[in-house]
Amino acid sequence: MNICGGEKNGNCTLYFKRDRTSLIKYRFGKYEKIINNKQLTAKTICETYIPKNKNIEFCKIDVEGAEKRILLGYDFENFRPNVFMLESITDKDYKSWEYILFNNSYNFAFNFRGNRFYYNSKLEGMKERFIGVKEKIILYKNEFMKRNKKKIHRNWIPFKVGEIKKWILKILILVFEKNNL
């Protein structure tokens, strides 16, 4: 899809700097390129691409600082993922949008590598699915460090995107397999 997500349908401006893109003009300092593009709300995107009454198990939002804009345009009544994962590199990032999830009956589960996990509190048993998941991920991390006797950043940041995706997948398997979701 060649569209931007936002709080309203219309047009938006994308700012590019090397391999980074943002809807926020000063997110990465000086930008190199500007593109005007079509913008749709998350509600419109869901209505267009997700069949009615389809259960959404997992929704990842990673939009380089525009998370609040996406959440403001989201339809929490008709499209309720069991789990949301939103990227938030700094405390300032998530503090600007987290209240939207709380106001729509989502609870914070935990943070892993700048990705914050929230579960749908209206679903019975969701809180229990997250019990012990972070601890298991820490065990996986320790095993990974033993197997890969290379120098790893003090906060344990795998340097390859593929490795990060593997760890997030392990989290999801732990959460969704726990009670055969």
Image (cartoon, rainbow, N blue to C red):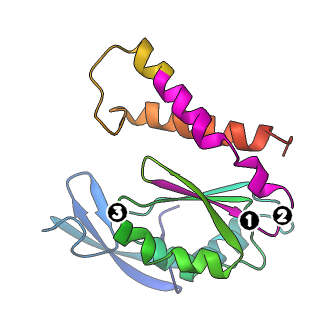
**Which residue is label 3 attached to?**
90
Pointer 1 and pointer 2: residues touching (CB < 8 Å)? yes
Q: Secondary structure at mark 3?
A: loop
* Label 1 secondary element: strand
Query: Mark 2 packing: few (<14 Cα in 10 Å), some, or many (20+)?
Result: few
Q: CA distance from mark 1 to mark 3?
A: 23 Å
Lower sequence index among marks 3 and 2? 3
Which quadrant of the view contains residue 59? bottom right
Instruction: Give the percent coordinates (x, y) of residue 2.
Output: 47, 64
User: Which residues are drawn in magenta?
Assistant: 115-142
In x, y percent, where is residue 132?
67, 41
Q: Residue 159 is drawn in which quadrant? A: top left
Which residue position holds label 2?
123
Q: Amino acid at mark 2?
A: Leu
Look at mark 1 in the image and give the residue it sits on: 120
Q: Can you tell which quarter of the image residue 79 is in? A: bottom right
- Would residue 43 appear left or right of 82 to someone viewing this image? left
At a point 70% along the width and 37% down the height, the residue shown is: 174
Magenta highlight on residue 130: yes
Is 144 situated above or below 57? Answer: above
Q: Residue at 72% across / 75% down in the picture?
A: 105
Q: Is residue 40 visible?
A: yes
Q: Amino acid at mark 3?
A: Thr
CA separation in Å, label 3 and label 2: 29 Å
Asked whether the beta carbons under mark 1 and mark 3 sit within 8 Å of each other, the answer is no
- Residue 65 visible? The answer is no
Q: CA distance from mark 1 to mark 2?
A: 6 Å
Q: Are marks 3 and 2 in contact (CB under 8 Å)?
A: no
Question: Residue 20 in the image: x percent, y percent?
Answer: 28, 56
Q: Residues within 10 Å of mark 3 (few under 14, many from 20)?
A: few
Q: Secondary structure at mark 2?
A: loop
Neighbours of disc 1 within 10 Å: few (<14), some (14-19), many (20+) = many
